[in-house]
Image (cartoon, grey):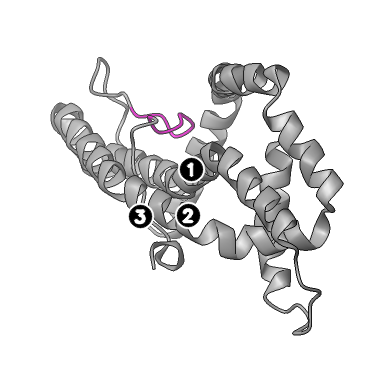
Amino acid sequence: MKRILAAALIGVASLAHAQPASAPVSPAKKALVDKLLQLQQPGIEVFARNLLQMPAMRMMQEAGLALQRQVAPDKREAVGKQIEAEMKKFMDESVPLVRERAIKIAPSTIGPFLEEKFSEDELKQLIAWFESPVNKKYQEIGPQMQNAFVQKLTAESAPVIDPKLQALDAKLRVLLNAPPAPAPASGPANTTSTTRPAPTSAKPPAPKASAK
């Protein structure tokens, strides 16, 4: 049912250009939409967090490359820990702000989309599904399934992607007339992989549009 939330979020842009004269929505339908939004709140909160976490992962990857290129091997572990600490601090401070705004704007953005695209009977069916034990069970195991999938995909992809990234890095260095990358250090200092996703606690720069 996360597709419903995604569809609603995508449809917000088109609603901004909707016809000025729209049919009035009955109080009963508005109440159904409000209830559905309340049931969708966990998904909205996850969406808000991902809005920050996706850029954070990119930043961690870029930081990992810079760590290998610009930091002496004996200092990489300490600098890497400092980077992770700063990312965590950013996420801890930013996620609640974006989550609060996401919940606040949902009724005025996703709400009209649901009112326009779904009938009262369809909204009742959606609510029944969200409240069903089957859906609740599925939502409970969702994070575990996603985590297992991401870890497996990362492990399976690293042997193929890492050499390609290294080759790309070498070619770019030639084009930029930059010195070759230093040999990776052995031991715990060399902990940042270009294909390894950022820790779930890592934080990225919040998109300014969302943080308004």
Q: Disc 3 or disc 1, which is closer to the eye?
A: 1
Per the rendered image, the range of residues in magenta is: 192-199
Residue 135, quarter of the rendered image:
top right
Q: Secondary structure at mark 3?
A: loop
108 with respect to 7 (left or right): left
Q: Is residue 85 left or right of residue 19?
A: left
Q: Is residue 156 above or below residue 162?
A: above
- Give SS at disc 1: helix
Residue shown at 65% from the left, 56% from the top: 9
Q: In this figure, which residue is indicated by the disc labeled 1?
A: 45
Please report contact status of discs 3 and 1: CB closer than 8 Å, yes or no: no
> Which mark sits nearer the N-terminus, 3 or 2?
2
Bin the neighbour count of mark 2 within 10 Å (Cα to Cα): few under 14, some 14-19, many 20 and up: many
Residue 140 is inside the magenta segment: no
Mark 3 and mark 2: span between their CA atoms?
A: 16 Å
Q: Quadrant of the C terminus?
A: bottom left
Q: Position of residue 90 (x, y in %)?
A: 26, 47
Q: Nearer the viewer, residue 52 or 179?
A: 52
Q: Measured from the top left, where is residue 59 in percent x and y?
A: 38, 47
Instruction: Kindly identify the amino acid type of the residue bearing the numbered disc 3.
Output: Pro
Q: Earlier in the sequence, mark 3 or mark 1?
A: 1
Residue 102 disc label: 2
Does any portion of residue 170 appear in the rendered image?
A: no
The residue labelled by disc 3 is: 205
